[in-house]
Image (cartoon, rainbow, N blue to C red):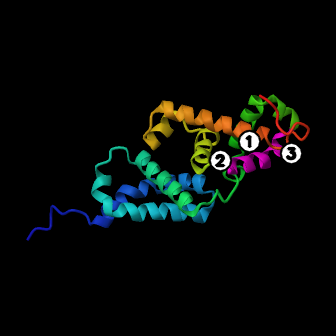
Amino acid sequence: MALLPFKPSRSKRFEKLVQPHLGAMYRFAFRLAGQQQDAEDLVQDVVVKLYPRLEELEAIEQLRPWLNRVLYRQFIDEVRRRGRRADRPVSDVAEPERQATFLDSYAADMPELAEQLSSERLKPIMDSVIQELSPDMRTLMLLHDVDGWSQEDIARMLEIPVGTVKSRVHRCRASLREKLLERPELFPQAGRVEQ
């Protein structure tokens, strides 16, 4: 009775397939969830969910974008199920140089805002305003404007056309600007500045 050729056990095949992507999955989950424990739970939930689908995973050519898509959808499902906002402000999750670029881009788009506040004073206000966005919009802002994902990468992850990503980014930025302009701590004399 010959043992060869043999097929590695299911768990070994799954581990070999998913293990190289766990670090990237965790980093992406941390960007989404904002806390170590939530990110670990999110990755664990996805891995447990995918284990029975080993044959499907083996047939996927580009596994990393596919895993990111599954992770993102799991995150959005969790946020909707719990009906909660992000637990940590964006400024705590984003790297300092990305934060500065993000804040500077909004200050440049809104000169009246740049005159009112330094980026240090703008940070907590921006965090508060971003918390008011829907989970989908907040995630899009984090991926595109803070982490610097290209619209093409986001489109691939979400399996939507690039044009849809562009319009969502535009709507998200417009919503953010509107919310900023309505903040009395920024514009106390006017209540709202007309654009």
Amino acid type for the residue under numbered disc 1: Lys
| Quarter of the view holding residue 142 | top right
Where's residue 13, x and y in %?
31, 60
Instruction: Assess whether residue 174 is covered by the magenta stretch.
Output: no
Which secondary structure, mark 2? loop
Instruction: Pick the residue in front: 89 or 77.
Output: 77
Label located before the other in sequence (2 or 1): 2
Q: Is residue 84 above or below residue 158?
A: below
Residue behind mark 3: 185
Would residue 22 be visible to someone looking at this image? yes
Where's residue 8, x and y in %?
25, 63
Label located before the other in sequence (3 or 2): 2
Q: Find out whether the residues at labels 3 and 2 contact each other: C-beta distance under 8 Å.
A: no
Distance between the Cα atoms at labels 3 and 2?
A: 19 Å
Instruction: Pick the residue in front: 30 or 126.
Output: 126
Distance between the Cα atoms at labels 3 and 1?
A: 12 Å
Would residue 101 be visible to someone looking at this image? no
Q: Is residue 88 left or right of residue 33?
A: right
| Quarter of the view holding residue 176 | top right
Where's residue 114, x and y in %?
83, 33
Residue behind mark 1: 179
Q: Is residue 28 above or below residue 173?
A: below
Graded by Cα atoms within 10 Å as few (under 14), some (14 to 19) or many (20 or more), the crowding at tag 3 reads: few
Tell me the magenta residue range: 117-133
Amino acid type for the residue under numbered disc 3: Glu
